[in-house]
Image (cartoon, rainbow, N blue to C red):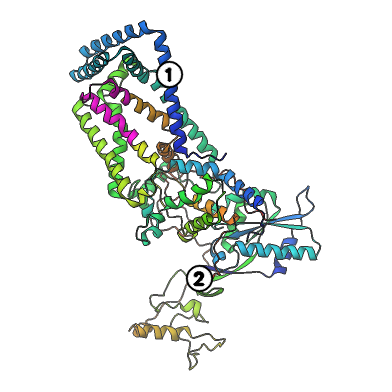
Amino acid sequence: MTSRWNPGAKCWLRAVIVILVSVAATQLWSEQTDATTSASRASTQTTARTDATTSASRASTQTTARTDATTSASRAAGVHRDIASTLYNVGQGPALRLCLLVAVLGILYRIWQFRRLTRVAPGRLSAGAWAGMAAAMSGHGSWRRGVIPHPVMRTVSLAFHILLFLVPLLLPAHNMILHRSIHASLPAIPAPLADWLTIVLIALGAFFLVRRLVSPRVRVLSTAHDYLILLLVLTPFVTGLMAYHHVLSSPWLMIAHIASADALFLLLPFTKLGHMPFLVFSRFFISGEYAWMPGRRAWGTGGHAGGRDK
Amino acid sequence: MVKAARKPLEEIFDMILTYKKARKPRDFLQVLTVGCGGCTSVCLAGGQREVLALNEELTAMARNQKVPVRFLSSTIERQCNPQFLDEIEDLVRDCDCLLSCACGAGVQHLADRYQDKPTFPALDTLFLGVDIDTGLYEERCRTCKKCVLGLTGGICPLSRCSKGVLNGPCGGTRADGECELGDGLSCAWNSIYERLKDQGRENEILEIRLPMDWQEKGQGVLVQRGFEARHNGRSRGR
Amino acid sequence: MNGSTDDAIMAHRIGRVLEKSGEMIKLSLQACAHCALCAESCFKFQSSGGNPGYSPSYKAINSIGKIYRKRGRLSESEYNAISDLVWNRCALCMRCYCPVGINIPSLIACARNVCRERGVFPAYDGEENS
């Protein structure tokens, strides 16, 4: 059971393998159905343009961007173009679904693991749930200070995490795609606002990066895993912003956007990104000094056998 | 910290042997000696080393008296916190009874946690005290719940005065500042006076303090400042 | 010190400790975001003047983290370094606060357990205490 790999490295390896396998599989698929691929690409464009005329102008801008990307892709060699558009379609389609599925299954696994590693602790009092939460919020210093004691980190982290989820969910472009596939979507924010929020998010991410490089207590803990994950988290936002503003006329920008987002979902339960579900478990279900809601559980499966003498 | 001293070996041995019920299919009694990494480790009464030494002595005693007993051991961080009691569950299941090397509080917590096994105390808990030197400890606090150390220059009249008087010396102070009980004890109130004089506060010794309320109020409970809302309405433990 | 000089038995006992707590350790180390926000809640960190080697996450990762990764097979000097981390640099006062909710004291306690199995634990009657 001894492993040379740290948990982060193993996850990277798994992610790379999955992505390579998906790419290889879809490439094989596209070689077999070459003609169908071209036809479906044309129909995608038509559908996109039709949608644009019925949506707001900002939606059509997004469509134009994608059409532009596809157009510039067609200027490249034929095989290159096929790979690019295949990846583009697969990335939003089967690969995205696969990665989301893995994320959901992974979180369910974590929940199951959490239940297995903790147990209802005898003798731990749980005040009535909401009363307990109110109590935790009012009297105890740590909650008054928020999740994070330091004021700057608290603001930055909170803003970062909120934007992390809010911006992709409320982006007009994403909602348009969602609407096209399941005929339902969330309300969308105006595109300029989305732009600014993305820039803010990237700036906050840069703050994290600088902090990790500059602060000695953080630097001593940091591994390549930390830096790579941070960059990976920022990649969809940077590439999305760039693609939206036509910074580079290459289809690979959008592919990077999709691939990095897919990778994030894939890696969510298995890397340090899993600190998010972990936080929910431990703050709401474990009883302890810093619990938000006095939970009824405690860590422990029932002891270890140690120290047995002769 | 809490200071404790190990009971005499014979007392411990006899205590354990009152419980003769060995679990089948064994025909010997299996005892788990549980050490404590907290206070009793620091005062060299019940830490890992002391536990191993105790087990050796008890094993020798058992062999001499031809009693079939086997002693296992495990030292945990502290026995007064439930978090650390869980980890010996496996061992406890295997044993017939527990011998705790914690202070009285730890023994009780351990006994509460593993209620189906008898828990025997290996130590006598003595006092709250300070380290004077390695192996030398003195009482300093009687947990009177009404600390007057600010008024007495940091010398506790309850724990250091032989009579525990609260308002000045009893009149039995010897000329050299010793307590009339002898035994090398110094008069606490003399020390208090000297201390206050050094700080230019000797007049404060004239202030009268009300007597301590030693009425028995039952088991003490502390809800720490800031946690009132969390433990709303809970005045007793279990 | 632990009464047995048999390395195989010692390794077996350490292995049992890690087996029981291993998954919790692994999960905690994985969930650790390496944010070092626990440092401010540690009085030893504060009184050391902000020495990064005193932050709870550093102590946990370099004690039980190291032990877990090497399955307890560390050299004597490595164990001494670890015991310095978990006994000299940590009072197990249990005040450390992790935003993510990792139970850092239990990780330190687990490291102390392994050290005790290995026969490494503080001597309160050592010369430095008199």
Q: Height in image: C29 above or below A67? A: below
Camera-side mark, 1 or 2: 1
Residue in the foreground of this view, choosing between A209 and A302: A209
Range of residues picked out in magenta: A231-256
Q: Residue at x 53, y 57 (%)?
A: C77
Q: Which residue is mark 2?
A: C128
Q: Amino acid at mark 2?
A: Glu
Q: Is residue C69 left or right of residue B74?
A: left
Residue in the foreground of this view, choosing between A215 and A58: A215
Residue in the foreground of this view, choosing between B100 and A30: A30
Q: Residue at x 41, y 41 (%)?
A: A279
Q: Which residue is mark 1?
A: A24
Chain ID at mark 2: C
Res A140 seen here? yes
Chain ID at mark 1: A
Q: Is residue C101 magenta?
A: no
